[in-house]
Amino acid sequence: MTVNGTRPDDGPLVSVIVPNYNYAESLDLCLRSILDQTYPNVEILMVDDCSTDQSVAVAEALGVRVVSTGRNGGCGRARNIGAAHTSGELICYVDSDLVLAPDAVTNAVRLILGDRRIGAVCGIEDPEPLLHDTAVARYRGLQYHYWSISSEGDVSFLFPAVCMLRRHVFEEIGPFNPGLRHTEEVDYGYRLSRRYRLVLTSLVRGRHDHDHELRGLLRKLFHRGRLRIPLYARARRFGQGFETAARAWGSLAAFGVLPALVVPLLLGPWGLVVPAGLLAASLACDAGMYAFVRRRHGIPFLVFFAGLHFLVNVTITAGVATGAVQWLASGTFRRLYDASFPVDPTPLRGPA
């Protein structure tokens, strides 16, 4: 392996770019996992988004090159700066709170070079959290893993925690939108998947330090739901991958349980059938996931998981509803993704 050089006899150079902001706690594990990859021709760059912890010192102690963003600007801007400071034929983004499986880069290179129609390959995260083994982190790891493996194949989301794309595709599609903080990967995946295959695969794996505090997780999911509305309104379609029709109905049914609790007050005990029916419908919409959780952690944890997932469904629906109202009321909000929709768009195509 090379850290800052090239070895052309070992396959195309892969530029592994690690955007980072205050993740010194996991950064050492992340960078060591990249240094330990079985693929031999790698350069590593850590793009520090003006961290206030020891992140830069951690990277430099391992001999990893570091560039600074100059000002805090978010993951999208850090990824763009990383691409500008590297030269590999393939670009591999790895979040600084994720540890790669040893063969992740090798498998990603093999997949992306094996089909010229593939513009990018994204990996799937293990179900167990990397560092913070709280109940919330275990919920998030299991939920995210199951939704990912059930979406394996062609998707329209970019999963940027671990992904590889061809440099010429990055140059053709253009940079990440630096003005987006919660949905830059959805925007980029939409732009890329209009022209190339975007593949999610379990052959590329990593273990992630998932959200481990409830408030932070719910806040992130609320804003992600809200900010996707202008994109989907312009695209006139939902994303391919996580957002199945069953899961959308499951979220709506969970949200409907809350106003339906008024029904028993009006109709008496028989009115409980309405909220109970909506809850049962919500659970049925993701029955496979609940069976997966029960097999791995048993019924007591499943009860906790189902309760937290109900809260997550309500939060996502509330975010989507807020986004819909904001879309109706604000022209600025409606134009949030205008750069993704040129006036004279290039026809959809794939490479010859």
Image: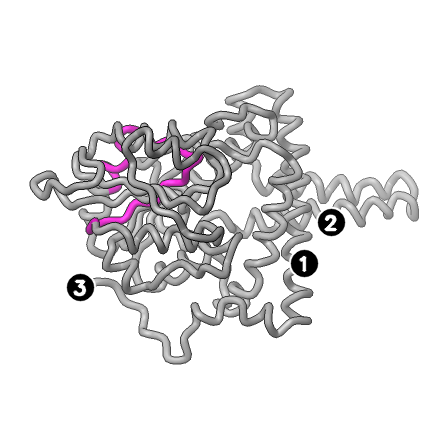
Which residue type does callout 3 highlight? Ala
Instruction: Work out whether 258 lies above or below 336.
Output: above
Q: Earlier in the sequence, mark 3 or mark 2?
A: 2
> Which residue is identified by label 3?
352
Q: Are marks 3 and 2 in contact (CB under 8 Å)?
A: no
Q: Earlier in the sequence, mark 2 or mark 1?
A: 2
> Which residue is identified by label 2?
256
Q: In this rendered view, identify the residue nearer to me: 215 or 254.
A: 215
Determine the image quadrant of residue 271: top right
Which residue: 29% across, 40% down? 65
Where is residue 131 shown, x and y percent of the image?
49, 25
Graded by Cα atoms within 10 Å as few (under 14), some (14 to 19) or many (20 or more), the crowding at tag 1 reads: some
Determine the CA span between mark 2 and mark 1: 13 Å
Which residue: 50% across, 55% down? 183
Which residue type does callout 2 highlight? Gly
Magenta span of residues:
88-108
